[in-house]
Image: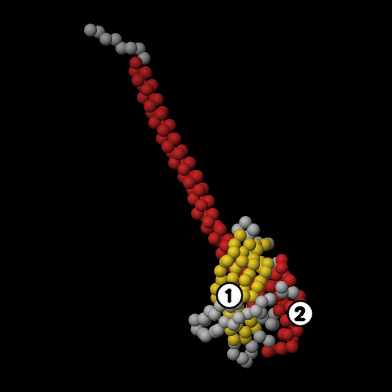
């Protein structure tokens, strides 16, 4: 029995093999594309979910740092350089807070320094505790409680330290955080590790 080959038979088989290879290649490409897609959008989801929270916390921390700096600026007073003190206060306030520390206040302070001369106290302060109690990321505003130890130093006398508490409303403005309102609050007794300072109670405005 004589068999004859079908013309084009090998070519047909070769075409099937080629097609299978193409399909396999396309499947690999599709798989790679799916992995890349998942990687990109999964990363973006993680970025939004995790890093978005991280960014919010960073802004919150910046607001807290800004409120601390405001209180340091208004409670550190060098009577020999009242110009610098006024500049640091002016740079810290906006809105309603600008009416809380006025030009008349600076004038009164200057008169006191002139009257007391070398017996004028120098005030230095350090932050003991602070915490954000309100925060609005959209408006970039926050309310922060700040407690500081304020030390009064008079030449020839023993320095005295008092703990003072403040409620500070801050807003992000001109690239930094400024106080829109400052209120004195009851100070918390915070013991200095090396001392026995008792915190007094401060009044209102």
Q: Earlier in the sequence, mark 1 or mark 2?
A: 2
**In the image as oriented, which residue stretches furthest toward the top?**
1
Question: Neighbour class for label 2 at 10 Å: few (<14), some, many (≥20)?
Answer: few
Q: Nearer the viewer, residue 59 or 145?
A: 145
Q: Which-is-in-front pick, marks 1 and 2?
A: 1
Q: Is residue 167 left or right of residue 105?
A: left
User: Which disc number belongs to residue 59?
Assistant: none
Residue drawn at 29 percent across, 10 percent down = 4
Q: Quadrant of residue 125?
A: bottom right
Location of mark 2 (residue): 107
**In the image as oriented, which residue stretches furthest toward the bottom?**
156
Whether 99 is drawn above or below 136: the answer is below
Residue drawn at 70 percent across, 70 percent down = 97
Q: Is residue 95 left or right of residue 72?
A: right
Contact check, label 1 and label 2, Cβ < 8 Å: no
User: Which disc number belongs to residue 147?
Assistant: 1
**In the image as oriented, which residue stretches furthest toward the left?**
1
Residue 150 visible in the current orientation: no
Q: Quadrant of residue 1?
A: top left
Q: Is residue 32 left or right of residue 192?
A: left
Question: Neighbour class for label 1 at 10 Å: few (<14), some, many (≥20)?
Answer: many
Return the x and y of residue 121 as percentages of the image width and height: 66, 85
Residue drawn at 73 percent across, 81 percent down = 109
Question: Looking at the rendering, in which quadrant would you find the C terminus?
Answer: bottom right
Q: Nearer the viewer, residue 179 or 116?
A: 179
Residue 99 visible in the current orientation: yes
Residue drawn at 64 percent across, 77 percent down = 75
Return the x and y of residue 203 as percentages of the image width and height: 65, 79
Return the x and y of residue 17 as percentages of the image width and height: 36, 24
């Amino acid at each position: 029995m004589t068999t004859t080959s079908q013309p084009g038979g090998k070519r047909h088989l070769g075409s099937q093999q080629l097609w299978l290879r193409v399909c396999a290649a396309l499947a690999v490409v599709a798989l790679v594309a799916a992995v890349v897609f998942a990687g990109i959008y999964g990363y973006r989801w993680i970025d939004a979910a995790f890093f978005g929270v991280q960014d919010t916390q960073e802004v919150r921390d910046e607001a807290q740092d800004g409120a601390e700096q405001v209180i340091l600026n208004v409670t550190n007073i060098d009577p020999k350089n009242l110009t610098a003190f006024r500049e640091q206060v002016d740079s810290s306030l906006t809105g309603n807070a600008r009416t809380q520390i006025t030009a008349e206040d600076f004038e009164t302070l200057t008169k006191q320094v002139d009257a007391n001369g070398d017996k004028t106290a120098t005030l230095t302060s350090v932050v003991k505790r602070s915490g954000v109690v309100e925060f609005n990321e959209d408006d970039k505003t926050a309310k922060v409680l700040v407690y500081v130890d304020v030390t009064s130093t008079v030449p020839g006398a023993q320095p005295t330290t008092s703990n003072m508490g403040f409620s500070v409303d801050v807003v992000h403005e001109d690239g930094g955080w400024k106080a829109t309102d400052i209120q004195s609050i009851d100070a918390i007794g915070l013991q200095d590790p090396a001392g026995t300072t008792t915190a007094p109670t401060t009044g209102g405005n």
